[in-house]
């Protein structure tokens, strides 16, 4: 396993997962906003503190223009988190590891990229956002299906899985952190709009059916419980951490000098297992989020120093 | 999602119908080739005096003729889309955008009859054998120079000659694991135009062209025996591993690429994929104690064979160009110790130097005691006084080439040059005669090609690929390159050329 390829494999999967998550959340927001004209949905179109400076620099515009913000989040190449940029980065990494991914997988990524750069895609975005976002979501799912079904179960596969799950972990934690956002729930004046917000979040994480099948009622507390402790659904902390641990264990057994990430992950898994999910509904949720993020950062650093350590000469 | 599903236009029925028509005259073709006019000055690969003779060629022509023009045009768009989807691209160095470009593909193939191909195959193998022997000799005893069989100064003054490598012999004495020999048709027979012996490229397009042809025209492949090309990657791997010592039970072969910005990066990826060997960049390798290792996370893994797609000059900054960012420091020390095989070997540039090219027939006679099977284009080396005089007096009827240039760059076609260009080249030849050769302008053969909205004749050449390992193996056909611009003779991809599939007919 060459470290350069390991890093590119890791990041290709992170970008793909992020692309799908963002596309889902934009689709969910679009659909739910058609039902409700309440202010809460402005939350989804509000720029974060990280995005604001770049947005203002490019457009020199007020930040409450929903269409422009959505455009910024989908098409703006200068925005590293736009769908176009994420797809470009996924493809760029995929291009550099073409010899280890299947031809079909590469072609799928490339086709999506070419489509996003075509007039057809732009027209579809303007006229039919549902199908626009659906295409991105379905294609990304197919790509991930191909990775699962066609890759050799070697170190590259495990590294890709680690990339995918690390990204998912980050996104889920950020989503859970929304639950304690004063802006998020303060503007929901009644339980109906609160439920709509929760449903929108469930859709964003492909979890609506899983949630309902698991028998949870719709409330912030149960929502937090599901996404923290449920171990069957693939977008919950418990599931993600278990999966990450499995892939890291398999990597650890194959590679030398790779114990630290495993250690940090066990630490995180313990933290989460003892977590009271309601913590995400209070101010303490921010602290918990920071704790989890700091472990993710440590894991990433260890990966950088070990597997991705390009300066490291193994002698 | 772009789904490509092409339903052939009842190809079988059409072919049966077509065979009932008279085949002796282009005028009998009333479909795609209805208005086709072969060039009066060039051999046409489809419509020529050979035409009534080969029934399989006739079937192919009939097959294409029955395709309605609009449908055929739409197939070109489908093919273009397939190339884009698969990412079969190349980067043009001079293109500031650094855009990935599609190598234009024309759907009408070039067809070579089996008998002619057998002769070409024998000729290529003979030529490669002689060139390999030349390289072995030049980096060894230099007997051919001592015997005066070819001019010493031409060889030793070649930029491709690397005197530092004298005395270093690659394992098995194989210098030319992979060769690409450019052929044109002259006087009805295929003739050698140029040798590409350093890092010949283009084979991935051969394989992909065939894949797309089979996808779009399955009917013709079941009707006519066409030699396959799928074997190439495995044959390549075999030839690359041929020089490995039998002591090494599980040799590691890697493909060394300069990286994704190289014009042929797609080919590097493609071949490493098909051979199942790692694709590496220079930073993935390290030389320790004159042994090359691949940096893996399980530790250093010894590398036995490097299929290098990096030029000699850049391969090792401690030996050649110190400013090279593409090389592996210490690689030559490992190579000279015999601890790693480089394919192709270093120093091949002397053998594909255009100024040395006129002497290849002499090499064949000298090393093999045989007459060359394949003719080559008459060439004037400007280092020779008589030749230089002739060239300077006949610039407007010559094609002038720079001896160490490739990709079609630096070629002056006298007939098409302005008087200012001719004057400039005159001065340059006088100043540096060693850097130039000239050849008479050859009327490259032409082939029906979809261009500018109609089927018209465009000039083509052919680059077969020859592999040398324990035995020599030639890929059936090779890359047919086509000059897409009207009246152009330049077929190179970097200068607007395209390609065609090459169909070598199986034995009848």
Image: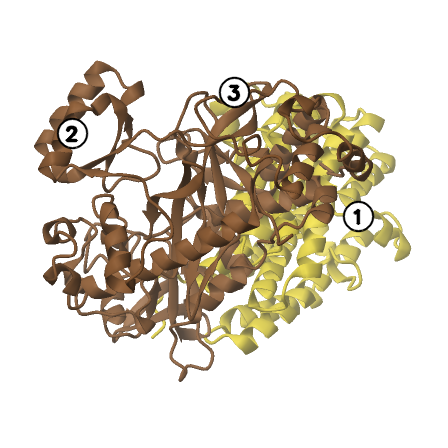
Chain colours: A yellow, B brown
The foreground one among A183 and B120 is B120
Chain assignment, label 3: A
Residue A59 numbered tag: 3
The foreground one among B211 and B377 is B377
The residue that appears at 76% across and 62% down in the rendered structure is A229
In terms of sequence position, does the residue under pointer 3 or pointer 1 come before the other? 3
Q: Quadrant of the C terminus of chain A?
A: bottom left
Q: For the residue carrying disc 1, how many other residues have a C-alpha within 10 Å: few (<14), some (14-19), or many (20+)?
A: many
Chain assignment, label 1: A
Residue A174 coordinates in the image, percent (x, y) = 64, 48
Residue A68 coordinates in the image, percent (x, y) = 62, 22
Chain assignment, label 2: B
| Callout 2: SS | helix
Query: Quarter of the image holding residue B63?
Result: top right
Q: For the residues tagged 2 and 1, is the chain the same?
A: no
Q: How many numbered circles does the render carry?
A: 3
Residue located farthest toward the top when viewing the structure as drawn: B419
Query: Quarter of the image holding residue B19?
Result: top right
Say whether residue A210 is left or right of residue B472.
right
| Callout 3: SS | helix
Disc 2/disc 1 C-alpha distance (Å)? 92 Å
């Amino acid at each position: 396993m060459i470290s350069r390829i390991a890093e590119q494999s890791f990041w290709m999967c992170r970008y793909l997962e992020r692309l799908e998550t963002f596309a889902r959340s934009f689709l969910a927001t679009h659909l739910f906003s058609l039902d409700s004209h309440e202010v809460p949905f402005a939350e989804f179109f509000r720029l974060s503190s990280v995005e604001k400076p770049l947005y203002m620099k490019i457009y020199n515009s007020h930040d409450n223009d929903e269409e422009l913000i959505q455009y910024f989040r989908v098409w703006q190449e200068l925005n590293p988190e736009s769908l176009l940029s994420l797809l470009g980065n996924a493809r760029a990494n995929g291009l550099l590891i073409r010899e280890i991914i299947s031809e079909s997988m590469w072609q799928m990524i490339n086709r999506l990229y070419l489509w996003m750069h075509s007039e057809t895609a732009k027209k579809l975005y303007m006229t039919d956002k549902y199908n626009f976002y659906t295409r991105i979501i379905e294609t990304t799912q197919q790509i991930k299906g191909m990775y699962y079904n066609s890759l050799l179960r070697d170190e590259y596969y495990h590294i890709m899985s680690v990339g995918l799950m690390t990204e998912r972990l980050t996104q889920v934690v950020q989503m859970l952190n929304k639950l304690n956002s004063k802006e998020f729930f303060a503007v929901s004046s009644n339980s109906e709009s609160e439920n709509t917000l929760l449903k929108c979040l469930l859709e964003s994480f492909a979890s609506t059916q899983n949630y309902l099948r698991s028998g949870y009622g719709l409330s912030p507390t149960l929502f937090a419980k599901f996404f923290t402790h449920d171990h069957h659904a693939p977008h919950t902390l418990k599931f993600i951490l278990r999966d990450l641990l499995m892939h890291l264990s398999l990597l650890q057994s194959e590679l030398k000098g790779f114990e630290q990430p495993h250690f940090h992950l066990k630490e995180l898994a313990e933290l989460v297992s003892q977590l009271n999910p309601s913590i995400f509904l209070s101010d303490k949720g921010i602290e918990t989020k920071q704790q989890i993020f700091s472990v993710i950062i440590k894991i990433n650093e260890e990966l950088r120093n070990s597997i991705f350590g390009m300066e490291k000469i193994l002698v | 999602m772009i789904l490509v599903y092409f339903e052939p236009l009842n190809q079988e029925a059409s072919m049966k119908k077509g065979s009932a028509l008279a085949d002796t005259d282009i005028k009998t073709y009333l479909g795609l080739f209805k208005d086709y006019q072969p060039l009066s000055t060039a051999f046409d690969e489809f419509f020529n005096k050979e035409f009534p003779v080969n029934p399989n060629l006739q079937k192919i022509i009939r097959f294409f003729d029955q395709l309605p023009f609009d449908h055929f045009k739409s197939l070109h768009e489908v093919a273009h889309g397939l190339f884009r989807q698969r990412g079969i691209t190349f980067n043009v160095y001079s293109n500031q955008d650094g855009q990935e470009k599609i190598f234009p593909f024309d759907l009408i193939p070039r067809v070579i009859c089996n008998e002619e191909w057998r002769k070409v195959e024998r000729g290529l193998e003979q030529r490669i054998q002689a060139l390999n022997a030349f390289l072995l000799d030049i980096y060894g005893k230099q007997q051919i120079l001592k015997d005066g069989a070819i001019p010493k100064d031409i060889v030793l003054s070649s930029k491709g000659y690397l005197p530092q490598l004298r005395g270093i012999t690659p394992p098995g004495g194989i210098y030319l694991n992979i060769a690409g020999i450019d052929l044109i048709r002259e006087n009805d027979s295929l003739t050698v135009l140029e040798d590409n012996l350093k890092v010949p490229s283009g084979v991935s397009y051969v394989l992909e062209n065939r894949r797309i042809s089979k996808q779009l025209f399955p009917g013709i492949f079941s009707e006519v025996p066409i030699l396959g090309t799928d074997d190439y990657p495995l044959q390549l791997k075999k030839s690359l591993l041929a020089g490995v010592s039998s002591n090494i039970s599980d040799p590691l072969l890697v493909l060394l690429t300069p990286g994704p910005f190289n014009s042929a990066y797609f080919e590097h990826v493609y071949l490493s994929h098909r051979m199942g060997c790692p694709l590496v960049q220079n930073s993935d390798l390290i030389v320790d104690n004159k042994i090359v290792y691949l940096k893996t996370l399980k530790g250093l893994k010894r590398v036995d064979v490097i299929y290098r797609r990096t030029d000699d000059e850049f391969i090792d900054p401690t030996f050649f160009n110190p400013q090279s960012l593409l090389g592996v420091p210490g690689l030559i020390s490992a190579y000279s110790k015999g601890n790693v095989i480089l394919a192709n070997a270093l120093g091949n540039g002397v053998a594909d130097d255009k100024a040395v090219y006129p002497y290849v027939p002499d090499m064949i006679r000298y090393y093999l005691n045989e007459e060359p099977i394949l003719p080559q284009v008459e060439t004037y080396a400007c280092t020779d006084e008589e030749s230089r005089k002739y060239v300077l007096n006949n610039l407007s009827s010559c094609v002038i080439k720079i001896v160490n240039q490739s990709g079609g760059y630096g070629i002056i076609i006298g007939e098409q040059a302005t008087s200012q260009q001719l004057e400039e080249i005159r001065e340059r030849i006088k100043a540096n005669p060693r850097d130039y050769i000239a050849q008479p302008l050859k009327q490259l053969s032409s082939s029906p090609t979809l261009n500018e909205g109609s089927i018209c004749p465009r000039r083509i050449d052919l680059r077969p690929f020859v592999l040398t390992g324990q035995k020599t193996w030639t890929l059936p056909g090779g890359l047919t390159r086509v000059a897409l611009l009207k009246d152009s003779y330049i077929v190179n991809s970097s200068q607007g050329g395209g390609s065609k599939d090459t169909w070598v007919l199986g034995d009848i």
